[in-house]
Image (cartoon, rainbow, N blue to C red):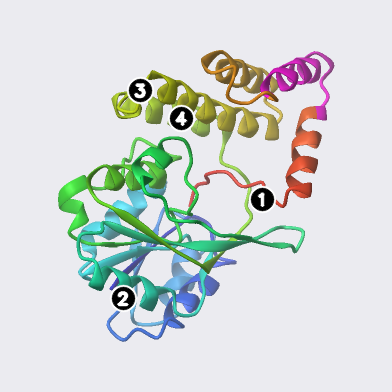
Amino acid sequence: MSVILPAYNRRATIERAIRSVFEQGLENIEILVADDASTDGTAEVAARMDSRVCVLRLPENSGPASARNVALQRATGKYVAFLDSDDEWLSGKLDRQIGFLERNSRFGLCATSCKFILSDGRTIERIVKNSTDWRRVLHSSQPFHGASTTVAPRWILKTVGYQDESLRVLEDWDWCLRIAIHHPIHVIEEPLANIYENQPTNPFLTFEATRRFLKKHEKEFMRYGMLHFLCATSQHWENVARNQFFYGKNSGGCSALLRSFLLAPWRNPLLLPAIFLAFFDWVFSSRLLVRILRFRAHLSNIPALTNREN
């Protein structure tokens, strides 16, 4: 088993992540920490923990896909598991996933449900039900946490290749979708990982990665028809809008929100009032929409998490 942890300036959390790997109790395990040019001593903290920890240092900050790919090229295990360096696994996670993949060799990926640990101390369980068509689901949403709950057989690299280094965001989502196109996916419904709330990714990176992701998978989305294509694409631009508004980028948020609405005005009836409120915020330099989104998320127990860098 090879465990891959991309890390960038995670000195404060890397030990917790690595400890949770050791607590899985597996004997034949290698831990590959791909340090993405950290400047806070992350690599040194990881290197002194245990001789089974191999630290791979990237010469410059290149993003989580590049970091994971460096580790994937060094991995020797029959299976590869991914864990972000600020998250942690719960007891028995790897045993459950390896057991499933051993019994079901045609599956290309096994993920799990998870618990979100919010910055205000709340814990929210995200229970993921298995889909009969993960390929379709992954066009517009990623219910399981692709960066910290997934395990795949290493032979999957021959089918789908490595992670897309042109995507600084959505890289794990893209990889899971590419797997789903060729192989079945299974999700263990029990939450077996803690995902810690973090700052959403830089809005420029999110915007650019979404544009690339949608362009890359345009024909794939169309496989299910024009209506599906429009709804899936609209959902992605709504996600971008949330990210832009979080960072106070009202111009970019309005643009993304309007694009989402025009693509599929019937998909979400709340988009139209949100557009008017967004333009109000833009004109008067207020943040009413962000406050409403956060309040609604709080009431709904929805973690305010978006795709993030390692």
Which residue position is annotated with label 3?
225
- Could you give the CA–CA distance between mark 4 and mark 3, rounded to whole angstroms? 20 Å
Dot 1: element: loop
Q: Which residues are magenta?
A: 271-288
The tag earlier along the polypeptide, 2 or 1, is: 2
Looking at the rendered image, the disc whose residue lies closer to the viewer, 4 or 2, is 2
Q: Main secondary structure of the magenta part?
A: helix
Quarter of the image that includes the N terminus: bottom left
Q: Nearer the viewer, mark 4 or mark 1?
A: 1
Question: Looking at the picture, which amino acid does disc 4 mark?
Answer: Thr
Nearest to the eye among marks 4 and 3: give it. 3
Give neighbour class at mark 4: few <14, some 14-19, many 20+ (Cα, 10 Å): many
The label number, if any, that marks residue 210 in the structure image: 4
Which corner quadrant of the image does residue 115 belong to?
A: bottom right
N-term mark: 3 or 2: 2
Query: Which circle marks residue 99 in the picture?
Result: 2
Q: Position of residue 253 (x, y in %)?
A: 64, 23
Q: Looking at the image, is mark 4 or mark 2 earlier in the sequence?
A: 2
Residue displayed at 79% across by 20% down? 281
Q: Secondary structure at mark 3?
A: loop
- Is 277 inside the magenta-drawn segment? yes
Tag 3: residue type?
Gly
What is the three-letter code of the residue carrying label 2? Gly
> Residue 133, position in %: x, y?
36, 45
